[in-house]
Amino acid sequence: MPDARNPDASLDARTVPPVTVIVGEEDLLVERAVRAVVTEAATALSALSALSADGDAAAAGPAGSADVHDVRAADLSKGELTALAAPSLFGSGCVIVVRSAQDAVKDVAAELTRHASAHEPDVFMVITHSGGNKNKALLASLSGNGVRRIDCPPVKRYGERLDFLRAEFGRAGRKADEAGLAALLDAVGNDLRELAAACSQLAADTTGLISQQVVSRYYRGRAEATGFTVADRAIEGKLTESLEQLRWALSTGVSPVLISSALAQGVRALGRVGSASRTQRAEALAGELGMPPWKIEQVRRQLRSGWNAKGVARAHAAAAQADADVKGEGASAGYALERAITEIVASRSAG
């Protein structure tokens, strides 16, 4: 199966499947996979066109001479897909990209299944589907019969995000150490598009090994004043330090949404680690909790500093309210975050 995290390395232009289904909700990975398959199909069509013209493979034209139709399933009506797949005046073939197939109406879903099974000459189809339960029957109907599937699973776990960063730097011909990768996650957050852009910028603007010092210097303090730093200080009961870090983070451009997310993640970590076995080693719990061992040990230290179940529940409510406020329900994101931090610190010693 092709590797969605680096699709360019896994596609073989010599044997291009007529239909490719790309499954997942990770937008960046889906978009990269679509782009790679379209390039592959267009190259194959150009070669095929050149061969049909004079039988000389070396005369193949440049990629991109084929027609590429990029549409959303929700925008299609009955018969439109058939019209797109019809031979063009010049017979150069086409590539049809149908995005978000889970949103296709019944007639369009049936048409998609029919065309995916027909394998019309000179027509390549690329279909994306979120992979959820919506229109799940369509996804099942597209399986088999020469259809290639590329999965773009979500990158959620800490280790997976580190692997993503390593791959990004590898694509750019650069290397980063573990501390540098962790610092970049702290500085930028978890959004893959932002992380990919950050890797590209660091690769272009720096030299040598990308270390924690390089990342910190590049972001001019942002790595030291992130939402996670704010959350850690609040959970440790350090109100003044947490508020100082909050103001610094906001002043250096850290999104309030990232800070509220960090507060929520920090409080959730208290609950998850607190409910896990206290006798198991952090390494043994890492896979179960989806957290690196060092983070589990850190949360255990935080729990021992005065947290109990009632306090964690109260802090969770405060973090949830802050998340709602910074996403539009509150008048001031900064005030909502200050209030949440104050409440979380107070919750730490709540009986």
Image (spheres, rainbow, N blue to C red):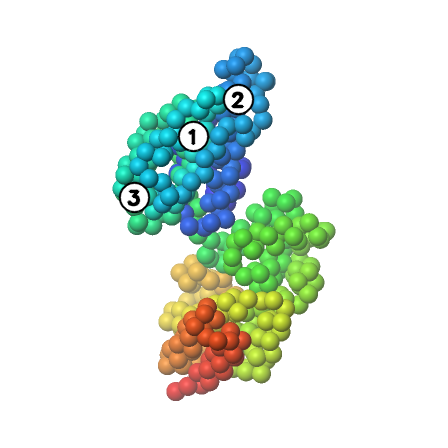
Taking the image as shown, residue 56 lies to the left or right of residue 86, namely right
Q: Which residue is mark 3?
A: 105
Which callout, 1 or 3, points at the residue further toward the start of the chain?
Answer: 3
Residue 323, how many percent across, how many down? 45, 71
Lateral position of residue 102 relative to residue 324, left or right: left
Label 1 CA crowd tier, 10 Å (few <14, some 14–19, many 20+): many
Q: Secondary structure at mark 1?
A: strand
Residue 138 figure quarter: top left
| Residue nearest the observer in this picture, 312 or 257 | 257
Q: Is residue 236 visible?
A: no
Res 222 label = none
The N terminus - image quarter? top left
Indicate the quadrant containing the C terminus: top left, top right, bottom left or bottom right.
bottom left
Q: Earlier in the sequence, mark 1 or mark 2?
A: 2
Q: Which residue is mark 1?
A: 124
- Residue at horizontal 37 percent and vertical 71 percent from the top: 275
Residue 131, relative to residue 122: is it above or below?
A: below
